[in-house]
């Protein structure tokens, strides 16, 4: 399986805090059925390294790949980032191509402050698309606006934005609102992808094994395959995502 959203790169955000933890997360991914991970450190958050597309990003990324090789951990790691979209510099970042897309594709993983209004998020998603990217909305089920007004998710789906639900939301580890909203998105066929959004080997971990049982209660095996394998593969290959057909 492919994990499209994971804070596995060490030293760069609130995910893996050092090389040992990053390797532990990589081993956990492999043990639980994930063989490809897209490294998606937070990008453009004020109190963290910027993690923009830069020489320092590629240095850290290259060092991590070398580290895995040195420790004989056969996990494929691809580049990416999770762009925190706020109004002050979004247009500039997009115009200057300072964002790291998912494995060099047109797909851009994007997050918002949890309390951002639906109008504000929608405007930013429009701007991202206008600049030639395909927005992948990170954990829509965690945003208050989606929890309170699920119609917004229907609208985003119709607009062609990709909706990425978190494993932890489905498992009820990210609060009741997120759990309820994640179930809604899956039951209505609005989710395109599930990812771990892992930050730690044990707390918010990598891997999808614990997810299988929970998912089987909510959706079909075919839909689960689309969410965990087919669509992530299409995204990292820069191909069109397949909409769920319930
Ligand atoms: Fe994340």
Image (cartoon, helix red, strand yellow):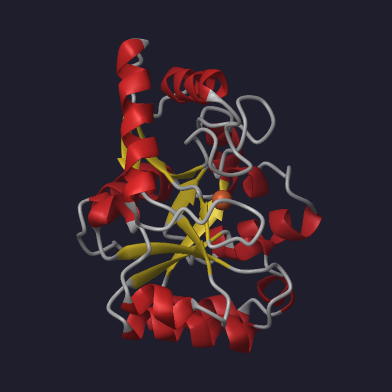
Q: Is residue 37 shown left or right of residue 148?
A: left
**Above or below 230: residue 210:** above
- Residue ID at (27%, 47%): 233
| Quadrant of the image occupied by residue 84 | bottom right
Task: Report the front residue among 222 and 144.
Answer: 144
**Above or below 56: residue 53:** below
Q: Which quarter of the rendered picture does the C terminus lie within?
A: bottom left
- Residue ID at (42%, 42%): 39
- Residue ID at (31%, 23%): 66
Q: Position of residue 224 (x, y in %)?
A: 43, 45
How many marks are shown on the rendered structure? Answer: 0
**Above or below 135: residue 1:** above
Task: Report the front residue among 99 and 237.
Answer: 99
**Above or below 64: residue 90:** below
Task: Report the front residue among 66 and 219.
Answer: 66
Q: Where is residue 193 in the image (x, y as percent from the top left)?
A: 43, 54
Q: Which quarter of the rendered picture does the N terminus lie within?
A: top left
Using the rendered image of the protein, determine whether residue 105 is visible from the camera's viewpoint: yes
Q: Where is residue 153 in the image (x, y as percent from the top left)?
A: 55, 75
> In the image as oriented, which residue stretches furthest toward the right?
176
Q: Where is residue 60 in the image (x, y as percent from the top left)?
A: 39, 37
Using the rendered image of the protein, determine whether residue 244 is visible from the camera's viewpoint: no
| Quadrant of the image occupied by residue 186 | bottom right
> In the image as oriented, which residue stretches furthest toward the front?
55
Task: Report the front residue among 178 and 63.
Answer: 63
């Amino acid at each position: 399986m492919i994990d499209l959203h994971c804070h596995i790169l060490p030293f760069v955000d609130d995910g893996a805090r050092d090389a040992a933890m990053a390797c532990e997360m990589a081993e956990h991914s492999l043990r639980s059925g994930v063989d490809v991970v897209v490294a998606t450190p937070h990008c453009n958050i004020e109190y963290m390294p910027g993690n923009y597309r830069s020489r320092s990003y590629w240095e850290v990324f290259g060092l991590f790949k070398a580290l895995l090789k040195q420790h004989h951990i056969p996990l494929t790691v691809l580049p990416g980032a999770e762009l925190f979209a706020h109004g002050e510099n979004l247009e500039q970042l997009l115009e200057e191509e300072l964002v790291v897309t998912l494995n060099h594709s047109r797909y851009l993983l994007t997050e918002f402050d949890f309390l951002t209004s639906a109008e504000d998020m929608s405007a930013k998603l429009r701007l991202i698309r206008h600049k030639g990217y395909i927005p992948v909305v990170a954990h829509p089920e965690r945003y208050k606006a989606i929890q309170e007004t699920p119609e917004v998710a229907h609208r985003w789906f119709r607009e062609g934005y990709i909706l990425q639900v978190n494993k932890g939301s489905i498992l009820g580890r990210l609060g009741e609102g997120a759990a309820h909203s994640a179930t809604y998105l899956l039951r209505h066929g609005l989710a395109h992808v599930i990812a771990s959004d892992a930050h730690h080997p044990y707390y918010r971990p990598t891997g999808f094994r614990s997810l299988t049982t929970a998912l089987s209660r909510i959706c079909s095996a075919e839909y689960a395959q689309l969410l965990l394998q087919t669509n992530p593969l299409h995204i990292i290959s820069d191909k069109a995502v397949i909409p769920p057909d319930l």
